[in-house]
Each structure stands twice: as C-alpha cells, then as structure tokens.
Image (cartoon, grey):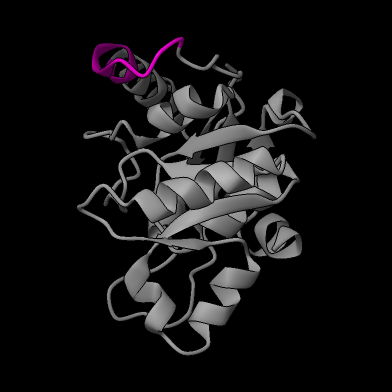
C-alpha cells in the first residue's frame, strides 16, 4: 500500500513520531473510504487489526483478503461479544487494533456520532488510544466509479491518549467525545502543512 499511498494518492503524513512501534494500542480514526484501513496501517508503519462488518466475510475473494490484512467480523448494531473477544486477543498479542470511531463511513470524513466501543476496549485492556485523521479519502471513489481516483490524501497522527481509569459509561463518553474532537480538529487542518 505504501507506494500507492505516496505516489497515486500523493500521501502526506504528519505526526508519525507519535506512533509507538511496539506494544498494544487502539488506533481510533475517522472513516470515509474502503481504502482507509490499509492507508492507516501504512501510515503508522505497523500491522493493525480491524473490525469489519460480517457481511464482507461472505464475499468470495474479499473475505480472504481482509482476513490476511488482520480483519475480524463484527455484527453491527449489536453488542458483539465475539468481536470484542477477538479485539482483546489481538491486544494481548501486542497488536494495534483499529477502530473507526463512528462505526461506519461518513460522506465528508468528519465524525458526528462517535461510538464508545474503542473507549470500552481501552478500559478493558488498559491500553492507550492513538487518534488518526484521514483527509481526502472520501473522494477516492465517486458514485458509479470502479477505479479509485488519484486524489491528494493527508494523514495526521495525534498524541497518545491514556486509557480510561474505569469502564463507567460517563467516563467512556467523555473520552470518546475527546477522541472525536481531536480527530475532527486535525481533519479541519486539511491538506496544508500546519502541524498540531
């Protein structure tokens, strides 16, 4: 993915020094394109395991590809204990686990309705969260297009956010809103070279 990111999408990455290259963590990001998981993994330069909607695992070819990329299925719209267990197993093995904070793609890449799942995982595993903002990926595919469009993409990586001290709903909600605010603030910087 790295050559595609840096040439075809003219990828600019800011904040790479904020990524721990070992140890468990949860990467939280906005989400606007099917390309987002490999872009995030390439940008942080370490393997990232992702939850993916279970319907994708019934698509021949795609299922094998996303499994190779570290994806595991989640039943959206329910408290999927199997997906939580799978994420915890990855964390216990020292992986980075990726969670899209909104739980689905948004049309403009901004987060408006963040879910508490990432904060809950961080509380259970007592690992930090790493906020990542993707700018421009919503333009990679337009309606009716089968080929990804060569658009400029910018990735901004924020500073680590400590795990919550408990899994109390209020604390998880505050942490989730904080993660969303940090990601949206980085997203609002756009393509320019302004650093956080």
Q: Say which residue appears at 39% left-offset and 29% top-offset.
A: 120
Is residue 184 toward the left or the right of residue 18 in the image? left
Q: Is residue 18 above or below residue 30?
A: above
- Where residue 97 sits in the image (x, y, percent)? 57, 43
Residue at the (39%, 68%) spot, across then down: 141
Q: Nearer the viewer, residue 185 or 192?
A: 185
* Quadrant, the C terminus: top right
**What is the count of numbered marks?**
0
Residue 152 is at least partly visible in this image: no
Which residue appears at 50% of the width and 81% of the height?
62
- Place of residue 49 in the rendered image (x, y in percent of width and height, measured from the top left): 59, 52
Q: Quadrant of residue 112?
A: top left
Residue at the (32%, 47%) spot, across then down = 103
Instruction: Please state the horizontal and vertical placement of residue 174, each as a whole percent of the image.
Output: 30, 13
Left or right of 79: which side holds 98?
Answer: right
Q: In which quarter of the image is the N terminus?
A: bottom right
Whether residue 176 can be seen here: yes
Determine which quarter of the picture holds residue 30. top left
Q: In this view, does 67 lie above or below 82?
A: below
Image side of residue 174 versus residue 78, left or right? right
Give the vertical position of 33 relative to 40 (above or below): below
| Front residue of 120 and 16 | 120
Q: Is residue 127 left or right of residue 74?
A: right
- In the image, the segment drawn in magenta is 165-173
Q: Residue furthest bottom?
A: 60
Observer-nearest of 10 and 63: 63
Q: Position of residue 40 (x, y in %)?
A: 59, 48
42 up-or-down from 118: above or below = below
Identity of the residue furthest to the right in this view: 21
């Amino acid at each position: 993915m790295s050559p595609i990111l840096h040439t075809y999408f003219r990828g600019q990455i800011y904040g790479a020094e904020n990524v721990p290259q070992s140890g468990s963590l949860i990467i939280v990001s906005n989400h606007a394109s099917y390309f987002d998981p490999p872009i995030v993994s390439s940008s942080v330069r370490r393997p990232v395991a992702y939850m993916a909607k279970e319907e994708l695992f019934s698509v021949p070819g795609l299922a094998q590809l996303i499994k190779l990329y570290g994806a595991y299925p989640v039943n959206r719209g329910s408290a999927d204990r199997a997906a939580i267990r799978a994420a915890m197993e990855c964390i216990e093995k020292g992986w980075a686990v990726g969670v899209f904070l909104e739980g689905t793609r948004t049309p403009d890449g901004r987060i408006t309705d963040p879910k508490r799942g990432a904060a809950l995982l961080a509380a259970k595993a007592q690992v930090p969260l790493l906020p990542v903002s993707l700018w421009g990926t919503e333009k990679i595919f337009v309606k009716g297009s089968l080929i990804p469009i060569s658009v400029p993409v910018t990735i901004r990586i924020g500073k680590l956010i400590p795990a919550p001290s408990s899994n109390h709903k209020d604390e998880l909600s505050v942490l989730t809103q904080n993660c969303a605010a940090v990601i949206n603030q980085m997203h609002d910087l756009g393509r320019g070279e302004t650093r956080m």
